[in-house]
Image (spheres, rainbow, N blue to C red):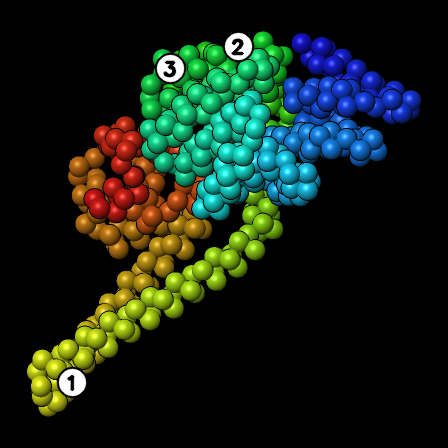
Amino acid sequence: MDFQKKLLIFSLLFSFLSEADAQQYTPKKIDSLIAATFRLADRNEALKISNKTYKASEEIGYYLGKAKSLKSDISSYLGLGEQEKVLVSADMLYDLAKKENDDYHCSQAYIAKTIAYAYLGFFEKALKTSEKAEQFSKKIKDNDDLYSSLGQIYAGRSEILNLQYAEPQSTLKYDLQSIEYFKKIKNKTKRNNWLSSQYSSIGNTYIDLDDYKPALYYNRKAYELGKQENDSINQAFGLFGLANTYLEMNQSDSSIHYYKRALPIFEKANDIYRLQYIYDDLALIYEQMGDDKIYSYYTKKSRELADIIRKKERLETNKVSNSIIEEEKESWYQNLYIFIGSIVLLAVVFFFFTIKYFKSYKEEKEQKENIEDDLIEKEEELNNLELKVNDAFAELLELAKSNDSSFLSRFKEVYPFFYNKLITNYPELTTGQLQFCALLKLNFTTKEIAHYNNISVRSVETRKNRLRKQLGISSDIDLNKWMMDF
């Protein structure tokens, strides 16, 4: 299989270079080369080809060739986790399509930006961008392009909810809507490719719902359609979903089998996010099997990628966030001014009717003085209490962030009632689990826990799921809120 893939890449490059020399580019040949890039596991090779097809299309004045080349770039950058480059390519695609009044590619540009913003954690921006994509999609005349765009839009909204750890039932609704749109596509290859991608997504949603039968069904469908269309990436996602399902079903051998089938494809694609998940899960499996050597190997691989991902995400987020932050600041200040103005207006009205009601300036003055005295006294009490609480809370946060060994001891002193109640009701909790509960009590997010403990987000989610089962907490209850209310 690897030989066939290498042969495909070599043939594509050779064909392209030969055509370049002969200056025999035609729209049909360019379209064929671009279509092949979406089936390549090696995203860097795909980028080389799409870069050349863009230049060739520019030379012969072929607009759709340039637009499709940019779409190929976006697909490759998404696979490589290069969100900043996705946004740059999407802006180029939009500017190009807007000049041609091409609603389909305008919609595609906004769909790409939606996913990039979501992966960077700008969820509100992602939803607004998704709405713009839908506005353009409603003007698309070609039915296949219309249904593929709408399917991608609803798949994107499912992913936004998933990245925010929303209830799986919410994401399932969008997953199913997406599939219904993709099923309406008449072009078989296009239909199969989109369905394969979305089947693996809905399979993962069923895993989150602990409903493993449909999870296996949809991930197998994803793999079969990917294989049918010779799409190695979609095959890999199907295999990844099967492995993940078997892991949740505690069928370690099957999970290892499918992970190791998916692994070389994701390695070739340089999909560091999927690779980190696989390494993390394989480490977990081998730890449970007692194989310390292999466990250590995959743990090391997972941590190395986790460090790379963390640095990469921080760098990309900083680059993209400046303009968004400025927009949000301006909006925040506007809302603040409105809020202050409303409070002032209400205060004026309140005092006006109070004065009118009592008809006595003296009584009003005495009442105000009494209120002011009470407020000053309460403010002093609150300030004293706030100083004590803030000092203890700030100290706890610093201990948690530095992963200090004295964190749990200090936590017992600050929250004795919570700690004693927890160990009384759940005496089987280990020290590590108690420390994890303490972080949740302090309202640390999944990403923060992963960052300060030098572990992956996936590991934190796994710990959360285990803790839910151990404490008997259903998946529709926010774990942080449960701890804070406990």
Question: Where residue 274 sits: x, y (%)?
Answer: 54, 27
Task: Quadrant for residue 275, please give it.
Answer: top right
Q: Quadrant of the N terminus?
A: top right
Q: CA distance from mark 1 to mark 2?
A: 79 Å
Q: CA distance from mark 2 to mark 3?
A: 15 Å
At x 73%, y 22%, the residue is 31
Q: Is residue 169 visible?
A: yes
Question: Where residue 477 sits: x, y (%)?
Answer: 27, 36
Choose the circle earlier in sequence order: 2 or 3: 3
Question: Where residue 439 sits: x, y (%)?
Answer: 34, 45
Mark 2 and mark 3 residues within 8 Å of each other at the beta carbon: no
Choose the circle earlier in sequence order: 1 or 3: 3
At x 29%, y 51%, the residue is 411
Q: Quadrant of the C terminus?
A: top left
Q: Is residue 382 above or below residue 185?
A: below
The amino acid marked with disc number 2 is: Glu
Q: Is residue 290 visible?
A: no
Determine which residue is flagged by label 3: 214
Mark 2, Cα crowd under 10 Å, few <14 / some 14-19 / many 20+, is some
Q: Which numbered circle lies on residue 369? A: 1
The amino acid marked with disc number 3 is: Pro
Q: Nearer the viewer, residue 369 or 128?
A: 128
Q: Is residue 315 above or below residue 237?
A: below
At x 12%, y 85%, the residue is 364
Choose the circle earlier in sequence order: 1 or 2: 2
Q: CA distance from mark 1 to mark 3?
A: 69 Å
Does 445 sit left or right of 90 as displayed?
left
Q: Nearer the viewer, residue 44 or 484?
A: 44
Q: Which numbered circle lies on residue 224? A: 2
